[in-house]
Image (cartoon, rainbow, N blue to C red):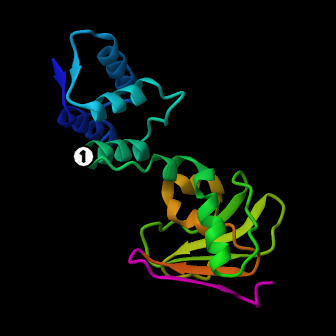
């Protein structure tokens, strides 16, 4: 029996659509690797199955990563570091700071940002206030800003990896900086003297 890319894409879809569980995936991968009668269509299939069998040393089996595996199977493109490793973004943070004449002031990824919940809206705005206890000072919102006491919700900054990793490269800007970006590649970064 040969396991194909199409077989794995179906498994990805089933997991994303909650037809199968993480345990089902791990069991499937272990059986595929341990059965001498099973062959793999190519190295991509073998690599993905190895990853599923080794979650503790590879990437977590969750919906975001399953979408990334599906993309890898279909196109060969890998974005796992961008969506899973905070330090992957350090160089791009430093580059943004250099580009916009800001000292690099990285945040503690375990502290909170204030964020709106309408993640699909555009554009994406961010501004960095002075740090308060337990926070990074960053406020990020999507689409139109609303004057509402409940507009911003606290979120551990590290969770941005799974939601909007493209934002992380701006989070090294120092207090007083703002950014405005959109899905079409627009980018504006500036220091707002009214924030400091």
Whole-percent x, y for residue 167 in the image:
55, 66
Residue 46 at least partly seen: yes
- Mark 1 is surrounded, within 10 Å at the Cα level, by few (under 14), some (14 to 19) or many (20 or more) other residues, namely some
User: How many discs mark residues in the rendered view?
Assistant: 1
Q: Farthest top residue?
A: 36
Q: Nearer the viewer, residue 149 or 55?
A: 55
Whole-percent x, y for residue 140 in the image:
60, 71
Magenta residues (range): 183-196
Residue 152 at least partly seen: no
Q: Farthest bottom residue?
A: 193
Residue located 47% across and 25% down the image = 54
Q: Quadrant of the C terminus?
A: bottom right
Residue 39's place in the image compared with 51, above or below, is: above
Q: Quadrant of the N terminus?
A: top left
Q: Nearer the viewer, residue 98 or 192?
A: 98
Residue located 30% across and 35% down the image = 44
Residue underneath mark 1: 74
Q: Farthest left residue?
A: 1
Residue 196's place in the image compared with 61, above or below, is: below
Q: Secondary structure at mark 1?
A: helix
């Amino acid at each position: 029996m040969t396991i194909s890319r199409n077989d794995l894409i179906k498994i990805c879809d089933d997991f994303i659509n909650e037809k199968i569980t993480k345990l089902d995936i791990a069991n499937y991968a272990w059986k595929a690797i341990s059965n001498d009668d099973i062959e793999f269509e190519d190295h991509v299939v073998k690599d993905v199955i190895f990853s599923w069998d080794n979650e503790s040393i590879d990437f977590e089996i969750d919906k975001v990563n399953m979408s990334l595996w599906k993309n890898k199977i279909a196109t060969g493109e890998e974005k796992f570091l961008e969506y899973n490793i905070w330090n992957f973004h350090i160089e791009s943070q430093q580059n943004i700071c250099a580009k916009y004449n800001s000292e690099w002031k990285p945040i503690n990824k375990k502290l909170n940002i204030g964020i709106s919940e309408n993640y699909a809206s555009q554009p994406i705005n961010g501004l960095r206030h002075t740090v308060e206890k337990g926070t990074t000072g960053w406020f990020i919102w999507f689409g139109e800003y609303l004057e509402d006491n409940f507009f911003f919700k606290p979120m551990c900054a590290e969770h941005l990896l799974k939601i909007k990793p493209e934002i992380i490269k701006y989070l090294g800007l120092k207090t007083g900086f703002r950014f405005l970006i959109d899905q079409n590649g627009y980018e504006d970064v500036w220091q707002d003297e009214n924030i400091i």
